[in-house]
């Protein structure tokens, strides 16, 4: 029932005075959909479709034995911190969906870029897509079980991050850990010249 | 892990399937997997343009599915997306498992006829039009 869905919506508290649109970006399989699902206080909107044989040779599933679906349009969720409501728009990860970012990114003030250290090289096109749109961003390493941990400095170098770009770690499956990564982004946005005025 | 095989549609073998959509006013048609990859395209569109069309159409269809729960119950299945532009009509129909047909037509084209042919093609060729899910 449509009305049943509506009754599940957690309405914005009256204390919210401003809303902010953020992108959650990252390469294929970085954990964007999981992240938005964990951190959202409303039931997230998802556009996940089964991964098909047509993607063989296009979408690299190496190291992702349990990945069976992929986001083809967007994820949407909302998280409120105090007086600020963060509207989270998750992007699809594959290159074929990059042209659709223009619409997704419209009005966004910043981006959280999720990375998996096992496929850091896949982040290049994501970082340049974010930079091309002039979005300030922070990077969060989604620490997958069984993935080797690297010193922050090595990851920074591999991603060629500017010294002013915050790098943090999270477990996208964990609500508190994901929220912390979001807070790092919000603090970065409020401290920089691109202030959320 | 099947990461080395070329895409099954490398040489556009399935184009013949789309020939029943060569109707007046139809610019091009593309067979698309649920995860946004072109499986076949009509000869009236380039491969690159068909690739981009496929990715965008899969997003439209998936958002349509996400909307289903907001305008019906859990059995509310998506049949068709129709997008009307100043300069085009875009029609999307589910075709078999994890696949869809996308058609771009003139805004003045006979949408009823096109949709009828799309449904017809989808049901006749449901099995062949499906895209199997990958087993990692």
Image: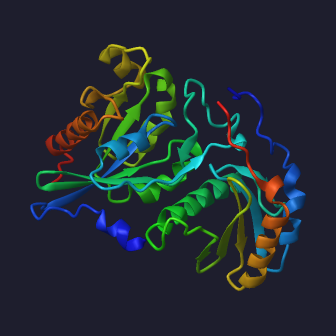
Most foreground residue, A192 or A25 = A25
- The residue under the point 50% across, 25% down is A119
Looking at the picture, how far across and down is residue B124, in whole percent? Answer: 85, 65
Q: Is residue A181 above or below residue B22?
A: above
Most foreground residue, A66 or A133 = A66
- The residue under the point 33% across, 30% down is A171
Left or right of A98, for residue B18: right
| Residue B109 seen in the figure | no
Colour logic: rainbow
- The residue under the point 30% across, 56% down is A42
Q: Quadrant of residue A53?
A: top right
Q: Residue furthest left?
A: A15
Q: Is residue B115 above or below residue A178?
A: below
Most foreground residue, A153 or A19 = A19
Left or right of A156, for residue A80: left
Looking at the picture, how far across and down is residue A94, in whole percent? Answer: 55, 42
Q: Quadrant of residue A113?
A: top left
Looking at the picture, how far across and down is residue A69, in whole percent? Answer: 56, 43
| Residue A128 seen in the figure | yes
Looking at the picture, how far across and down is residue B107, in whole percent? Answer: 67, 82
- The residue under the point 77% across, 71% down is B118
Q: Is residue B31 above or below residue A191?
A: below
Q: Quadrant of the image for the C terminus of chain B?
A: top right
Q: Quadrant of residue B41?
A: bottom right
Left or right of B17, for residue A95: left
What is the tally of numbered marks visible in this picture?
Answer: 0
Q: Quadrant of the image for the N terminus of chain B?
A: top right
């Amino acid at each position: 029932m449509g009305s049943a869905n509506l009754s599940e919506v957690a309405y914005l508290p009256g204390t919210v005075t401003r809303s902010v649109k953020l992108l959650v970006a990252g390469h294929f399989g970085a954990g964007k959909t999981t992240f938005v699902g964990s951190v959202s206080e409303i039931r997230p909107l998802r556009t996940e479709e089964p991964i098909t044989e047509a993607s063989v040779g296009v979408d690299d599933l190496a190291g992702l034995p349990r990945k069976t679906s992929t986001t083809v349009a967007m994820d949407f969720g909302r998280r409120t911190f105090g007086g600020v409501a963060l509207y989270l728009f998750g992007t699809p990860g594959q290159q074929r969906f990059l042209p659709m970012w223009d619409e997704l990114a419209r009005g966004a003030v910043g981006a959280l870029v999720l990375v998996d250290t096992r496929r850091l090289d896949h982040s290049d096109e994501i970082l340049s897509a974010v930079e091309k749109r002039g979005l300030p961003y922070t990077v969060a390493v989604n620490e997958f079980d069984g993935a080797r941990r690297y010193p922050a400095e090595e990851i920074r170098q591999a991603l060629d991050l500017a010294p002013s770009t915050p790098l943090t770690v999270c477990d996208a499956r964990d609500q508190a850990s994901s929220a912390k990564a979001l807070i790092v982004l919000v603090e970065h946005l409020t401290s920089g010249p691109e202030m959320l005025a | 892990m099947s990461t080395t095989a070329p895409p099954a549609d490398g040489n556009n073998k399935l184009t013949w399937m789309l020939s029943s959509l060569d109707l007046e006013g139809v610019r091009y048609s593309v067979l698309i997997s649920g995860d946004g990859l072109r499986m076949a395209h009509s000869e009236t569109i380039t491969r690159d343009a068909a690739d981009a069309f496929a990715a965008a159409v899969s997003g439209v269809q998936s958002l349509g599915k996400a909307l289903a729960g907001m305008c019906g119950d859990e059995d509310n299945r998506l049949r068709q997306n129709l997008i009307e532009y100043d300069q085009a009509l875009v029609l999307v129909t589910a075709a078999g498992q994890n696949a869809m047909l996308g058609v771009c037509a003139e805004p003045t084209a006979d949408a009823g006829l096109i949709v009828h042919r799309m449904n017809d093609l989808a049901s006749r060729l449901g099995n062949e039009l499906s895209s199997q899910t990958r087993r990692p």
